Image (cartoon, rainbow, N blue to C red):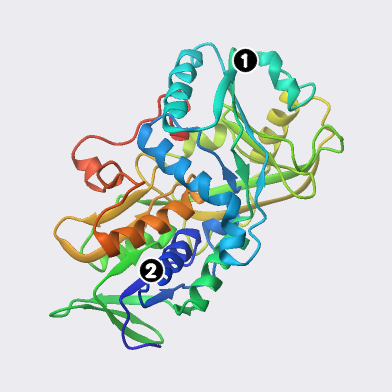
Amino acid sequence: MVPEADVVVIGGGVHGASAAYHLARAGKSVALIEKRTIGSGSSGASGGIIRSHYSTEPMIRLAHRAATRWPALAEELGRPVDYVRNGLVVVVDADDAPIMEEVVGTQRRVGVDTGTIVPAEISRWIPDFDTEGVALAAYERQAGYADPYSTAVAFAQRARELGAEIYQETTVTGIEDGPTARRVVTGGGSIRTPLVVNCAGAWAPSIARMVGVELPVRPGLLQMTAFDPRDARWHRASPTWLDLTTMTYCRPDAAGYMLAGGGKAENAVIDTEVVDPDAYPSRPPVEFEAEIGENLTRRCPWAALTRVRSWAGPDGNSPDFHLIVGPVPGVPGYFQVVGGSGNSFKLSPATGEAVAEWVTTGTCTYLDLEAFSITRFAEGRPFRGKYKMHIIG
């Protein structure tokens, strides 16, 4: 283990690996420490959806910046991330229709290639999509999807090529203060550094406590299921769709399956559920799979669904289900990108860029540090999505 580094990044998911890559690209010496393997936590369980359809401007701007990076990311990293630009359809009921008009206007002002459409137009992209109860829809042309595990690995491997040291199967046991730098202690040795970046996902609160920060992040469960629709109307280039009436999202994959998650049952407990990130169920309950299957066939009644597989992974949920990003007042030598709540894979090219920009210049161009700061909770300004399904952002 190297004796010192300019930055020690803790957590080898997409945010940590992206931070390591961007820091190494900026010329910093970096050590990335992961207690398991790269992409083995929430990143490996993510649905991999890339969208800019959010209802608050700081999130729209951050997601849009990330979206502009995705098309060329594989070439930049020299490895596949399995990115596909397939578009996104979002559907809402009559109560949310005025909200959609407002947020799509904000998205367009920011630069997102999107617009509202009448429900009947959805059939242009998803034939025979059932629009019962749908009052309005939006279509985002620049949306897409990518493989989260491949992305985390690509970031990490490119970081290593640029000089970053990567330590897997290595647990951080303590962070000690020193006169000019911190010492990150692990089972395999220690590293002196002036800056620790916490990207530890579900384990982020324990890392934060090592520097005296009480992080309002609860370990939660990210759940997904995959069905074979056995119908040519659905294929790898079909658009992702997000049904806010049932809180369900669905995207294709390379094999033409329907990868889906959400649902009302999951969202009913997301505010209170706490899981052990070291002993979580590897598969969602059958009730989750049944609800998601029903929601898929409600909109796509032609889909003769066969469940292919289901999976789950630990994640860290912040109180408002948005990332907490930035330094903490009164805690020098510490920065965090935590609490993504199953909602932040898509942002990883922009969050890593923001970490490197802050380290090298003290500012962030595309990420609003005040909006994403941990101080927003104490100051009464948490994110609150405008839709009834507020966790969409």
Amino acid type shown at disc 2 = Ala
From the top left corner, tell me how far across and down residue 284 is, in percent: 63, 48
Residue 155's place in the image compared with 301, above or below, is below
Give the residue drawn at x 49%, y 20%: 100
**Residue at disc 1, secondary structure:** loop
Spatial CA span between label 2 and label 1 = 47 Å
Give the residue drawn at x 72%, y 34%: 293
In this rendering, the label closer to the viewer, 2 or 1? 2
From the top left corner, tell me how far across and down residue 51 is, in percent: 54, 39
**Residue at disc 2, secondary structure:** loop
Q: Quadrant of the N terminus?
A: bottom left
Q: Which residue is mark 2?
A: 26
Quadrant in the picture for residue 78: bottom right
Give the residue drawn at x 41%, y 54%: 351
Quadrant in the picture for residue 149: bottom right
Earlier-in-chain disc, 2 versus 1: 2
From the top left corner, tell me how far across and down residue 36 is, in percent: 52, 72
What is the crowding at mark 2: few (fewer than 14 residues within 10 Å), some, or many (at least 20)?
some
Q: Which mark is residue 134?
A: 1
Residue 301's place in the image compared with 205, above or below, is above
Amino acid type shown at disc 1 = Val
Question: Is residue 131 something one can see in this rendering?
Answer: no
